Image (spheres, coloured by chain):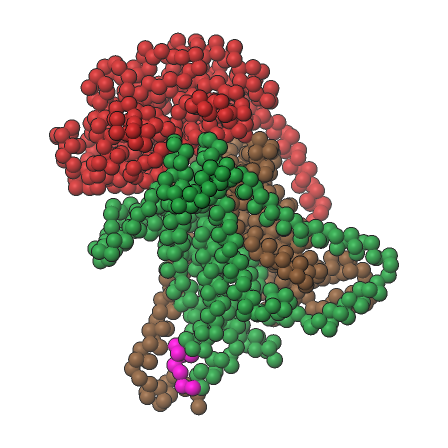
Chain colours: A brown, B red, C green
Amino acid sequence: MLNQPGSAQTAKLSLWRRFMNHAATGFAVGAAILVLAPLLAIFVYLLVKGAGSVNWAFLTQTPKPPGELGGGMANAMVGSALILAVASVLGVPLGIGCGIYLAEYGRNRFGDLVRFTADVLNGVPSIVIGIAVYGLIVLQQKHFSAFSGGVALGIMMVPTIARATEEMLMMVPNVIREAALGLGIPKWRTTLSITLRTASAGVITGCMLAFARVAGETAPLLFTAFGNQFWNLKLNQPTAALSLQVFAYAISPYEDWHRQAWAGALILIVMIVVAVAAVRIVTSRGMLKGTS
Amino acid sequence: MIRTLRVLLCLAVLASCAMAQTQLNGAGATFPYPMYSKWFNEYHNLHPDIQINYQSIGSGGGIRQVMAGTVDFGASDGPMTDQQMAESKVKIIHLPTVLGAVVPAYNIPGVNEELKFTPQLIADIYLGKISNWSDPAIAKVNPNVKFPNQSITVVHRSDGSGTTYIFTDYLSKVSQEWAGGPGKGTSVKWPVGMGGKGNEGVAGNIKMLPGSIGYVELIYALQNKINFGSVQNSSKTFVKASLESTTAAAAGVKMPPDFRVSITNPSGKDAYPIASFTWLLIPTHPTDKAKGKILKDFLFWMLDQGQTMTSALDYAPLPKDVVAKEKEAITKQVHD
Amino acid sequence: MSRTENEMNSPEGINPTQKAVTGIPALAKTATQRETSATSSVLERIRQTQPRSSRFPDATFRAVILITAISVFAIVVFVAWELIDKSRLSLHQFGLSFFYGHDWDPVNEVFGAVPFIYGTLVSSFLALLIAIPLSVGVAVYITEMCPVRLRAIIAFLVELLAAIPSVIYGLWGIFVLAPLLRVYVEPFLAKTLGWTGFFSGPMYGLGMLAAGIILSIMVIPIIASITREVLTAVPQSQREAVLALGATRWEMIRMGVLRNARIGIIGGIILGLGRALGETMAVTMVIGNRPEISQSLFAGGYTMASVIANEFTEATGDVYLSALVEIGLALFIVTLIVNALARLLVWSITGGSAARARA
């Protein structure tokens, strides 16, 4: 005798219970609206205030001295790309390697410890990592550099990629491993060419998500990459970064810089949304469909 | 896929080789940032293979980074203390570049007139003793201005700042209570107010917050069209910051051999009381000889051509005798 | 049996890698269970009969992989060591008084971290106060009340909130939220709730209230995502049982679902707290940068992360820098404890060995 809403039995419910039921629904719907409202607001503002400023000049020029109009963030975009490239070179292999360990060799107490450490690293505030990298690299090298910025961001990518890789590898059915091993393929080959390849779509999306997450990071770059008004492709020089530039312009008093800050922010968010949306598309196809 | 990556890598390496740029890195004061930015831009136009990258992180940052050796030069409007010079791993010489002025800028709804400030008034506002624009003490000095009943939002620097140094140096000279309290420094314990990062941040806050007052370098008030007032100098005249009054403040200053001098609250009828030199902090024995040579070349250019560009941005050029002394000091003390 | 149950409970397929963008570990049991130990011993036996020629490459590969796993350790150890090393001066000079000293005076070299600890705690607490009801509400909406077609979209949108970089939140906070607060919200709060003492004083727009609101927006996706997972993991049988006893939908949610998911939700809240404590850029841009303690939420404050961001590159004087690093060390330890606590809560739901299989 299930209590169906709308049936004759509901009429017997007390007013209080009915009221609470409706109130709860209203609260939940209200919560959903309140949560999504800032999201909408942020995107609308980014588009309205930033889209007009994303023009050819913005995308190709370097910043102008304060007070002069115009200029762009081209060097910041290139700088961000450089720093993220270094971060990926560091973070992706370490992350995937750690993930392979956790999935294939780490079903024991030591693996638990590594898993725990990875989660700890995930929770460390990015500014603390910036301090550590400043001490470890910038002070030793005696200069700020794109390299140190990349190291800081790479460190932040590792736990995300490791956990994603582990989960993807765990989803590969054991049958596949057994089949490969039964054919005489050595374990290392199995892991790389068979298991990892099967999970590759998921692993790649894990990497992309980690990438999207660190792409917007500013705090650790404050004292590693430092910033630069000029073009820079050298790893051992300070570099501009999109997130740093948006920060500097946002807290400045110049209207023109504010306008450019919105434009820079828009480009940053577009980059990230594309990555996250691509993840959604990829994971709705391929091996993950139906097994989630 | 691997092939594409290889090609891209080669291209990147080639590109970085082709752009055989020498880059110098400096950091420090936001006070002269508009001027330095223009200078480095012009210098780059003259010498396309040289880039001088300057990050305005505040004088405190400039001092710190040049002491640690992580930048090629620093910049500060608060000279380094003896203790800092002793602590520094790098031996540094102070070289003045321009003269600037710190102005009391305000944003009071309904008030567009130029306000007059006595030293006591500024000190009391920053000590928190005067907290509303309708206070009679303010009206006494500005009898013809109608003030709204608006609480005063004091804005100061949140970062280590030479502008703060200049401002608090002045306050310490004119107010005993201030000298005994927060004192002077690049970063002090402010009795009241909120912090902005850099001259840019303070100016930004003043623009945004009705009823606010803050201290910024002259060019930041001008460029952002913020009202600023005149300050009463030691000769009891109310002087507004300008090229003339800033130059007058430096007239007759006795420049010590290490160039570290304060010109706040000087004597002189037309002198603006809150003015200061700003310095570049140059290592005397640069580790990279090539960069040291470029820096030296830039400094001589700055003392000649550079000085002609200052007035356009409302910074006063250096007095001639100071320029001569500096050229001598650079030749003698900066090795390459 | 458990497999079909899970499939019923997660029609939209909560993708584990989605959580990677927010760094949320899988707290609830998701779909595929790892095979039992019987099968892994089969693997063991297969592995033992591998030809000898592959022993060496196998061992090398295992060693390389082990090194990458150890590197994660190495990183954490390096970070911790660097923090301790650089804060030694300050630890030595101030000792415990650092953590109850009120003064932050770089001129006189007196450093006390209380204003920052206060600011961090208040802003995080305010953020949780706002975020918890909203996150649980939206999670309940998505799992229990939402039409099935909308479920994936709304879930995606909520997780998108987590992907927005901190600096963009700060940008929006300065130019949109702060003026809104200054012109509309703060005067309203001062009129209605000013008597409490929390909503008094000059209204800047920027300040503790703005920081709390922005932090709450950043923390909501984390709590909501984990809450959604735990709610989905509650077996359908629980819901049906409560309904069968004559409950309304709300009563079913309250008694059958939320009660079971309580611990997981708390774990999510603690994880959200961890994020709020360490958040830097957005808070720095809207909090007003004032190292003072005030009762009013309108006043400016300062958090541990913000003071580091603002003053680190320019800390003249070794003690100054050391004091800042010590704040960083404190932040590191606190977030470590908070995250460890959240994980412990996870293990208490999923149990030890199951955690090993699917932690």
Whether residue C91 is situated above or below residue C214 in the rendered picture: above
On screen, residue C335 versus residue B171, left or right, reads: right
- Of all residues shown, which one is farthest toward the right? C52
Whether residue A141 is situated above or below residue C193 in the rendered picture: above
Q: Is residue C251 magenta?
A: yes
Q: Is residue B306 magenta?
A: no
Q: Position of residue B184 (x, y in %)?
A: 34, 28
Whether residue C138 is situated above or below residue A137 in the rendered picture: below
Q: Position of residue C335 (x, y in %)?
A: 50, 53
The image quadrant of residue C247 is bottom left
The image quadrant of residue C54 is bottom right
Q: What residue do we see at 61% from left, 80% from top? A: C1
Pick the residue in front: C127 or B183.
Answer: B183
The image quadrant of residue C344 is bottom right
Quadrant in the picture for the C terminus of chain B: top right
Residue A249 makes an appearance in the image:
no
Q: What residue do we see at 63% from left, 65% from top? A: C356
Residue range corresponding to the magenta coloring: C245-252
Q: Position of residue B269 (x, y in %)?
A: 23, 14
Q: What residue do we see at 45% from left, 50% from top? A: C279
Pick the residue in front: A201 or B63.
Answer: B63
Residue C333 makes an appearance in the image:
yes
Whether residue B284 is situated above or below residue C212 in the rendered picture: above
Q: What residue do we see at 77% from left, 70% from top? A: C42
**Count of numbered circles in the view:** 0
Pick the residue in front: A36 or C81.
Answer: C81
Q: Position of residue C230 (x, y in %)?
A: 50, 69
On screen, residue A176 versus residue C264, left or right, reads: right
